[in-house]
Image: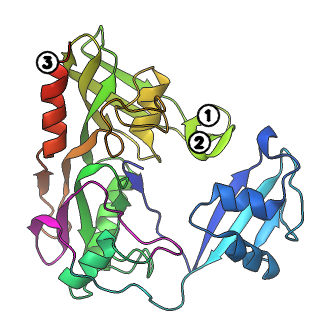
Amino acid sequence: MEDEILKLPDEDVTLEYFVGEEGNGIRIDKYLSELQSDLSRSYIQKLIEDKKILMDEKPVKAGTKIKTGSNITIIVPEPKEAEIVPEDLPINIIYEDKDIIIINKQKGLVVHPAAGHASGTLVNALLFHCKGELSGINGILRPGIVHRIDRDTTGVLVACKNDKAHQFIAEQLKVHSIKRRYQAIVYHTFRTDSGRVEAPIGRDPNDRKKMAVNHKHGKPAATNYNVLENLNHQYAHIECSLETGRTHQIRVHMASIHHPLLGDTVYGPGKDPFHLEGQALHAGILGFIHPTTKEYVEFQAPLPDYFTELLGKLRHKG
């Protein structure tokens, strides 16, 4: 998710899903474990036993088969005990003060732990670096995290050290006033210098692990793009500006207009000719009003080496 905005949870986190035609007749525990990769099937069965999973507002059994058109609600209890261990991991800090810390995230680094994966993440590194002084609004598993970017997306990301700063920045994300600009390399050249993709994004009805332009059940999403350079009649280097923060937004929107990101084997070609580690996507600029000074601040992360080297190869590719 290149810049998914994390909601401020209550004591429990509630997830809701609408069952499309592809889910009809599937056992609910199997359906949900595939849909929610962060939750194991055994954990989902435990939630069912505890009556934390409802279909059309009624508790279900593990063997219940879902029906097209049904609404499923999952109530995930907030973790009761912290199991996240501070780790001395390398992170590139761009800026830091008593309220915020700005990181240039490297490729391959997961932002926060998920169920069954509690180490080697940015959160583990932040807990070590900040000695536990991080905001607690997003729960034990995501201290300090206001928004996140995909594991294989590089670039600038902000974390918060206290709840006041977290709430202030989260509100800016909510009203889409934060400046977020990404650079990407995509397949195929453009005939125009800029464009805009405005299309709702939701779960792919044919593959529950993916997102897609979904006009029926998607949430509003808008991406603006500028073409920085067409590369040898085959590829293009672009800059994207987000108005919303949906899961995989840039990847889904660019694929929808036949310009999937290079290296993105989920939304683009199944084979990557350059053998990249995921999509060629970099969060280059992040700007917002500082929670204490109330002044606009802007941070930049330079393009990673693999990205600039790839640009050089593509310019000379015959």
Judge whether residue 93 is colored magenta.
yes
In-front residue for pair 281/116:
116
Mark 2 or 1, nearer chain start: 2
Location of residue 46 in the rendering, given as x and y in whole percent from the top left corner: 74, 80
Looking at the picture, does residue 124 appear above or below residue 208? below
| Range of magenta residues | 89-117
**Which residue shows up at 36% across the image and 36% down it?**
263
**Rounded to the nearest whole Å, what is the CA distance between mark 2 and mark 1?**
5 Å
Q: Amino acid at mark 1?
A: Asn
Q: Amino acid at mark 2?
A: Gly
Residue annotated with mark 1: 214
- Identify the residue at image location x=38%, y=32%: 272
Asked if labels 3 and 2 touch by Cβ distance under 8 angstroms, the answer is no
Placement of the C terminus among the 4 image quadrants: top left
How dense is the environment of label 1, judged by Cα within 10 Å: few (below 14), some, or many (20 and up)? Answer: some
271 or 27, nearer to the observer: 271
Mark 2 Cα shell of 10 Å, populated few (<14), some (14-19), many (≥20): many
Res 265 → quadrant: top left
